[in-house]
Amino acid sequence: MDQAIRDLEAEEKQERHRAEQARIDQGWKIQPKRGEAPPVLHRGGCAAYRAKDGQLLNRTQARLAVTHETYIVKCEICTPETELLPGRAQSGPVM
């Protein structure tokens, strides 16, 4: 019985981790300006920048950032703009 409980708890923990990773992967994040380097837009799961506060942008916020803030550059590793193009499937809400 104790083993069954431990197994269920471990499965629940793994499921929470998978759900959190999916939430992160569906979001975007902005790496702040550093010195002369402009801010950089990344996908939520991009390893090139780890946001300290875990704050993610949803699809609408990311589109607004790249359309209205021309000084934001896009990460060349995760290419966040590909998911923001018209006609792409919309990610679920993130926040």
Image (cartoon, grey):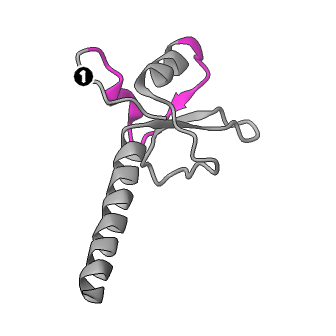
Residue 83 part of the magenta-drawn span: yes
* Residue type beneath disc 1: Arg
Callout 1: 10 Å neighbours few (<14), some, many (20+)? few
Residue at 73% of width from left, 36% of height from top? 36
Residue at 39% of width from left, 28% of height from top? 81
- The residue nearer to you, when weighing 47 against 89, is 89
Residue at 49% of width from left, 35% of height from top? 95
Q: Position of residue 62 (x, y in %)?
A: 48, 25
Q: Which residues are magenta?
A: 68-86
Residue 45 visible in image? yes
Which element is circle 1 on? loop
- Which residue is label 1 attached to? 88
Residue 77 visible in image? no
Image side of residue 52 versus residue 29, left or right: right
Q: Position of residue 20 (x, y in %)?
A: 40, 51
Residue 93 part of the magenta-drawn span: no
- In the picture as drawn, the residue positioned furthest to the bottom comes out as 2
Image side of residue 22 versus residue 61, left or right: left
From this view, report whether residue 76 is shown above or below residue 85: below
- Please, what is the dominant secondary structure of the magenta stretch? loop
